[in-house]
Image (cartoon, rainbow, N blue to C red):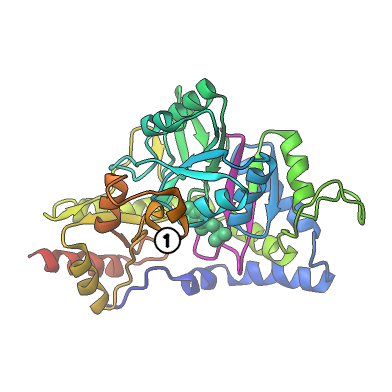
Amino acid sequence: MPVPLLDLKAQFQSIKEETMTAVLEVIESQRFIMGEQVGELEQAIASLSAAEHGIACASGTDALLLPLKALELATGDEVITTPFTFFATAGAIANSGGKPVFVDIDPDTFNIDPDAVEAAVTSRTRAIVPVHLFGQMAPMKRLQAVAERHDLRIIEDAAQAIGARQKIGGEWRMAGELSWASAFSFFPSKNLGCWGDGGMTVTNDGELAARLRLLRTHGGAKQYHHEEIGTNSRLDTLQAAVLLAKVKHLRDWADRRRKQAAAYDAALGAIEGVTVPPVHDGNEHVYHQYTIRAARRDDLKKHVSDLGIGCAVYYPKPLHLQPCFSEFGYREGDFPEAERASREVLSLPVYPELTQPQRESVVNAIRKFYQ
Ligand SMILES: *Cc1c(COP(=O)(O)O)cnc(C)c1O
């Protein structure tokens, strides 16, 4: 049975009426730029991530870039991040004028290792950008302790983790709640995706929120009056309307992703050659990806793909080894866990609409490979 890695057509069929009604309403109003739905979405996303302010923008990349710009990094200022992430994380750091400084990851969760972060702090370090990879939050309490000791800002890359939570001191805290700024992406394949590009920064810092609102509209609070040089990075009203209709389903979709993951854990955990993704204590994973480690990964990937089953390697080349960052002098062997992960990981279909027979075909294909 063919199984796509993600089935957005199935999702659309399940929410067609409500999304089409919402979109038609925007079209009737012809208010495509900064219509009222944008502000409504900003409130909805801020509230679901327990932050005070939401500032919508054109992409998840810009949702990272704009707060990094607000840091006003000087040449040589360093921002510590993980090499095992989507390119945008480090790209945004470089584009804001900062120097990305990579540190290794925790082999269980694939998230940044807080001890490695602390060891990499120098007099030029300004910020930490942890990524909540695949939908499980990085260890925020330990990262906050490092940030406090060295007076650093934390900007969360929460592009894959909208709705994820972590228990700190007995209380659930949301992805986006705990840092100076946090970035969400509404790229179509994300857990909350729109029908094009979109993103949002959330923050509890009112001054930063005001600054981000300026930066996304050419640095001007009043039309034709510019306090600083910003850019054009708004979220279309049409996209906001789609997201407002979809966000009502987010919690249910995350529950269904967790159920898919639990079924995979039970079935795949028994196969020698496969390591299922551990969830660290006090975490509620939202499974943007369900990512196993696999012996003979490339052969498994070919076997599974040949059977018409979608799977993908996120990410095949860690960022410290990317040609565009060669000036920083990293070498193969610098971050053994990130490098090993890039050789061993394979992400499997885990979307809410995945049926039981589809999931069983994925499991059977993997079981057959290792027999
Ligand atoms: C998707 C993603 C981004 C960038 O989001 P876009 O909306 O595609 O610009 C940044 N970081 C991570 C970890 C992502 O997965």
Per the rendered image, the range of residues in magenta is 178-200
Residue 26 falls left or right of residue 266: right
- Give SS at disc 1: helix
Front in this rendered view, residue 219 or 353: 219
Residue 242: image location, x then y, percent: 65, 64
**Residue 91 vs residue 232, the one in the foreground:** 91
- Residue at left 45%, top 45%? 132
Would you place residue 72 above or below residue 270 in this image?
Answer: above
- Label 1 crowding class (10 Å Cα cut-off): few <14, some 14-19, many 20+? few
Is residue 286 at all visible to an observer of this figure? no
Quadrant containing the N terminus is bottom left
Q: Residue at x 33, y 36 (%)?
A: 280
Magenta span includes 194: yes
Number of numbered labels in the structure image = 1
144 and 25: which is toward the camera? 144
Q: Is residue 272 magenta?
A: no
Q: Residue visible at 76% across and 42% down?
A: 211
Q: Is residue 88 left or right of residue 299?
A: right
Q: Is mark 1 within 8 Å of ligand 1?
A: no
Give the x, y percent position of residue 76: 57, 40
Which residue is under mark 1?
Answer: 323
One can see residue 172 in this view: yes
Determine which quarter of the picture holds residue 67. top right
Residue 244 x %, y %: 66, 57
Q: Residue at x 71, y 67 (%)?
A: 238
Q: Main secondary structure of the magenta part?
A: loop
Q: Amino acid at mark 1?
A: Pro
Quarter of the rendering containing residue 347: bottom left
